[in-house]
Amino acid sequence: MSNPAPASSFDPQDESHLKLLSIFYYVMAALGAFALVAVLGLSVLIFGVLDAGNAHGHGAPEAGELTALAVMMGLSAVLGLAASVLQFLTAQRLRQRRSRGLCQFTAAITCLSFPLGTVLGVFTFIVLGRPSVRAAFGD
């Protein structure tokens, strides 16, 4: 593994952009974690209401509908957690100037979060594509 280039070997503007990108990835990770808590809370609320409605004699949804809902909520939670972890790791790697490939992969995934993630992902590709930044990452 190569050592990152010293900060003086590239433009101070590149250093500033990497720091800003890192901060924004931390923010995106926090927003993703908040969304995960919201999905889990919504799941508990929905299934609690369904259970209470069933106990009071109201028509219960079919088992297939509940299974589909549970799978969708679970998948949403897992994907949100994975995205948040990737964004947190990317924020760290941008500060350390390591794992440029991971940063690009996360940028591509983050682009799917329209509109903020798209802007962040595109700017990440722009900054990581600069020759001076590539050299700082050891590429």
Image (cartoon, rainbow, N blue to C red):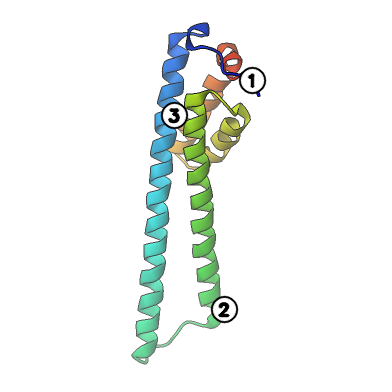
The reply to whether discs 3 and 1 touch (Cβ–Cβ < 8 Å) is no
Q: Residue 16 in the image: x percent, y percent?
A: 41, 17
Q: Is residue 109 left or right of residue 13?
A: right
- Asked if 76 appears above or below 64 in the picture, the reply is above
Quick one: label 3, few (<14), some, or many (20+) residues within 10 Å?
many
Quick one: label 1, few (<14), some, or many (20+) residues within 10 Å?
few
Q: Where is residue 36, by image quadrant?
A: bottom left
- Quadrant of image for the C terminus: top right
Q: Circle 1 sits on which residue?
A: 2
Q: Which mark is residue 64?
A: 2
Front one among 45 and 103: 103
Q: Circle 3 sits on which residue?
A: 22
Separation of disc 3 and disc 2 at Cα?
A: 43 Å
Q: Residue at x 40, y 25 (%)?
A: 20
Circle 3: residue type: Ser
SS for dot 1: loop
